[in-house]
Image (tube, grey):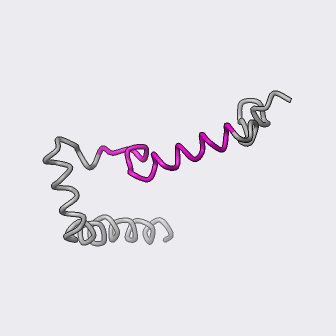
């Protein structure tokens, strides 16, 4: 029963909600702009989004200001070397 409900919800989003969202003028214009520039809009990565550059710069600055700030899964701790 749950699987059926999940499939109906996924199908509804995929077949109804996403096409409606994709038909909005702002999104259509962006898709066409990217296609005319030779970019496949369906193959973008999060690192290619405009906000990611600012976020990456901010994270780098935080790492420089506070070494060992982030948890390192390989060592089970931070990167500070302590």
In the displayed structure, 14 sits above or below 57; it is: below
Q: Is residue 44 magenta?
A: yes
Question: Which SS type dominates the magenta stretch?
Answer: helix
Residue at 30%, 71% (x, y): give it. Answer: 17
Q: Position of residue 20 (x, y in %)?
A: 24, 72
Percent x, y of residue 43: 30, 44
Q: In the picture shown, does residue 41 fall above or below 4?
A: above
Please name the residue shown 81% across and 27% down the image: 81
Task: Say which quarter of the image contains residue 45.
Answer: top left
74 or 13: which is nearer to us? 74
Q: Residue at x 23, y 44 (%)?
A: 40
Numbered range of the magenta stretch: 43-64
Image position, residue 69 (x, y; %): 74, 42
The answer to whether residue 54 is left or right of residue 78 is: left
| Horizontal arrangement in the rendering, residue 28 relative to residue 76 (left or right) | left
Q: Is residue 53 magenta?
A: yes
Q: In terms of depth relative to the viewer, which is nearer, 7 or 37? A: 37
- Front residue of 25/21: it is 25
The C terminus, quarter of image: top right
Residue placed furthest toward the right = 82
Residue 28 occupies quadrant: bottom left
The image shows residue 57 at horizontal and vertical percentages of 53, 43
State left or right for residue 81 relative to residue 74.
right
């Amino acid at each position: 029963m749950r699987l059926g409900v999940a499939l109906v919800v996924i199908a509804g989003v995929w077949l109804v909600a996403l096409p409606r969202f994709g038909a909005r003028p702002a999104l259509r214009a962006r898709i066409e702009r990217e296609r005319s520039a030779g970019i496949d809009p369906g193959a973008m990565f999060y690192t290619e989004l405009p906000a990611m550059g600012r976020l990456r710069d901010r994270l780098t600055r935080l790492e420089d200001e506070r070494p060992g700030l982030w948890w390192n899964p390989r060592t089970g701790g931070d990167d500070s070397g302590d």
